[in-house]
Amino acid sequence: QVKLVESGGGSVQTGDSLRLSCAASGTTDTINTMGWYRQAPGKLRELVATAIRRDGSTYYGEPVKGRFTVSRGSAKNTVTLQMNSLKPEDTAIYYCYGVWSSASQRREYWGQGTQVTVSS
């Protein structure tokens, strides 16, 4: 069974930085797409950032562009999110996700989430 485990959340002040990490276990396949979503209280889950291992491309949600950096680790099924210049509106539960796909199949994996709280 594939399991994604996040680490690195916490409580910080406005302007501080945090680094989230996520590692997948339970598979030898390469999870090509990995990234992060977040969900704040009373809001829908939104995409934060995605990193594609195959071609190195990255995508960011508009609210975090220029402040967050997503990257894939040297271990094939890992992803990190470097969050700088944090704002109170970044407060949310951050979920790591991964997508494995082939010509005929698609599987999604989700972590349990890690809390990020930014106070003013």
Image: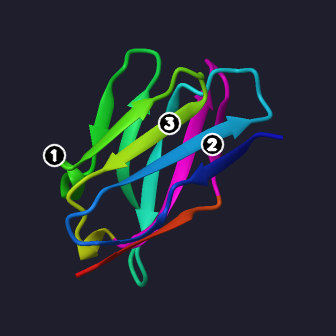
Q: Provide the major secondary structure of the magenta segment.
A: strand
Up the image or down, 89 lies above or below 79; here it is below
Up the image or down, 111 lies above or below 116; here it is above
Q: Position of residue 43 (x, y in %)?
A: 38, 77
Q: Position of residue 90 (x, y in %)?
A: 30, 68
Task: Mark 2 vs mark 3: give the one in front.
Answer: 3
The mark nearer the N terminus, 3 or 1, is 1
* Residue shown at the point (19%, 53%) measured from the top left: 62
**Residue 93 magenta:** yes
In the displayed structure, does residue 45 sit left or right of residue 30?
A: left
Q: Which residue is mark 3?
A: 79
Q: Residue furthest left?
A: 66
The reply to whether dot 2 and dot 1 touch (C-beta < 8 Å) is: no
Q: Which residue is mark 1?
A: 66
Q: Which residue is mark 2?
A: 108
The mark nearer the N terminus, 2 or 3, is 3
**Which contiguous range is marked in magenta?**
91-111
The mark nearer the N terminus, 2 or 1, is 1
> Which residue type does callout 3 highlight?
Val
**Residue 43 magenta:** no
Neighbour class for label 3 at 10 Å: few (<14), some, many (≥20)?
many
